Image: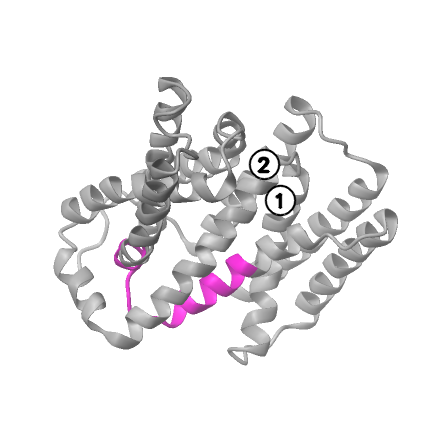
Amino acid sequence: MTRDPNPERKTLIGALYALGCFCLWGLNPVYFKTVASVPVIEVLAHRVVWSVPFLVILVALARRWPHVADVLRNRRARSILMLTALILATNWSLYIWAVASAQIVQSGLGYYINPLVNMLLGTFVLRERLRPWQWAAVGLASAGVLNLALAYGQFPWLALSLAVTFGVYGLLRKIVAAESLDGLMVETLLLLPFALALLIYLAVIGAGSFGMVSSHLDFMLMLAGPVTAVPLLLFAAAARRLRLAALGFCQYLSPTLQLLLAVVVYGEPFTQAHLVTFGCVWAAIAIYSVDSLRARR
């Protein structure tokens, strides 16, 4: 295996790809606000359908079709990917609904909590051991969530649902015999018949939005494909060039941008209770990150 002649340039390019990826994910609410008038389930169906052409191009360029075919022939992998596809569709639906119902702050909290949920899943499912400072981080984040629940008299189920569904999705994808692009292609193909059937049914009964409202809305719904696929392409490129720890730090850019958009642009409330909760979560992330860096050294 030859050594990279210019590792600094490779890291810089990887950082730029990561920046582009997480900025696009962080700005996702801007897109989903434009289609907020469309029912969530219909937006989800369009997201699946219009992702297929982009993923087909990506798989072709990467010459991964033989690997995709191998995954489709593997009954165990196909069954797990059907489950992960349903979980991913649930996560996407919750996120689309969060943006449409002006709950971007809570969705941002969910994606901040996600790495800590991953730790707990690793502990209780994969039997990985947490170090004392990692347990402290989990406890601090839990205290923050409890604070928000007590302040508002209701549990922040949306934030935790987003964190848990994405965490479980990642856990299952970890054990399935499929690379990231191959698995996503298979997941999308498995969801495609249901998405197409829904859109055809809505068109037949005259309840669909596509082709019924305006050409601008049609165009925005078609953009669901690149909105989904382009960040994934950038993420894959960044993952090949950056250390996992560096990529993990970059991921917090996405919920940070979502939080800024929610409060500054869309005027969602950010109360003292939110500040305490986010403060606990940010402190937990800092403890977890520092402890991980010390352990890696």
Please name the residue shown 17% across and 56% down the image.
Answer: 2
- Front residue (pair 9, 68): 68
Q: Secondary structure at mark 2?
A: helix
Which residue is farthest bottom?
127
- Front residue (pair 66, 112): 66
Q: Is residue 59 magenta?
A: no
Asked if residue 58 lies left or right of residue 292, the reply is left
Q: Is residue 81 visible?
A: yes
Residue 91: give its label: none
Please name the residue shown 19% across and 60% down the image.
Answer: 68
Where is residue 297 drawn, in percent x and y?
52, 63
What whole-number distance in Å separates the C-alpha atoms at marks 2 and 1?
A: 8 Å
Q: Main secondary structure of the magenta part?
A: helix
3 w.r.t. 132: above or below: above
Please name the residue shown 33% across and 31% down the image.
Answer: 222
Asked if residue 67 lies left or right of residue 219, the reply is left
- Front residue (pair 221, 179): 221
In the image, the segment drawn in magenta is: 165-185
Where is residue 143 drawn, in percent x and y?
80, 59
Q: Is residue 11 visible?
A: no
Asked if residue 237 lies left or right of residue 58, the reply is right
Which residue is farthest front?
205
In the rendered structure, are the residues bearing label 2 and label 1 in contact, judged by CB atoms less than 8 Å apart?
Answer: yes
Residue wearing tag 2:
99
Residue wearing tag 1:
107
Query: Split into 4 quadrants, where in the image is the N terminus?
Result: bottom left
Q: Is residue 181 magenta?
A: yes
Crowd class of label 1 (few under 14; some 14 to 19; many from 20; radius 10 Å) = many
Q: Secondary structure at mark 1?
A: helix
Quarter of the view holding residue 199: top left
Nearer the viewer's eye, disc 2 or disc 1? 2
Q: How is the image coloured?
A: one colour
